[in-house]
Amino acid sequence: MALGSSEKRVCFDFEVDFSNGGGIQGQGFRLDIEGDDIADVALADYLVRDMRLLMVGAVRILNKRIVSEPHKREAAAPVPAAR
């Protein structure tokens, strides 16, 4: 992937609840995205897939912002733009 000013990353906080109890949180987490935005539902799916989480009960996306900066890796699978 060629580097350019059009590359976007999403920076966000998240909370994940597991269906079997417990959970995890992240602050200032960043993921590469295609396009200029990503819906919270799509971002939650992307996060779960990227982190290979199992038994996820709920995902909350907080403080989401899109930043222009070079992608850090090749995407494993395309992520849909905002719905």
Image: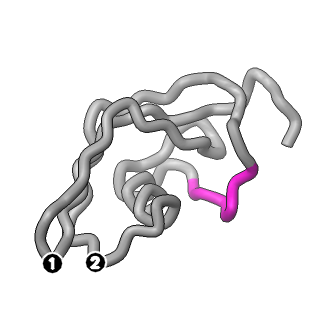
Q: Position of residue 83 (x, y in %)?
A: 46, 54
Main SS, magenta region, reads loop
Residue contact at pointers 1 and 2, CB within 8 angstroms: yes
Q: Residue at x 24, y 57 (%)?
A: 16
Please give the range of residues in magenta: 74-80
Q: Residue at x 36, y 49 (%)?
A: 40
Side of 65 where 70 appears, left or right = right
Viewer-closest of 18 and 34: 18
**Which residue bears the numbered disc 2?**
55
Residue 78 within the magenta-colored segment of the rendering: yes
Residue 19 within the magenta-colored segment of the rendering: no
Name the amino acid, label 1: Asn
Side of 46 where 78 appears, left or right = right
Per the model, the C-alpha gap separating discs 1 and 2 is 7 Å
Name the amino acid, label 2: Met
| 64 versus 42 height, above or below | above
Q: Residue at x 29, y 31 (%)?
A: 63
Q: How many numbered marks appear?
A: 2
Q: Which label is found at residue 3?
A: none
Viewer-closest of 76 and 82: 76
Q: Which label is found at residue 20?
A: 1
**From the image, which quarter does the N terminus lie in?**
top right
Query: Tag 1's secondary structure?
Result: loop
Q: Residue at x 48, y 46 (%)?
A: 38
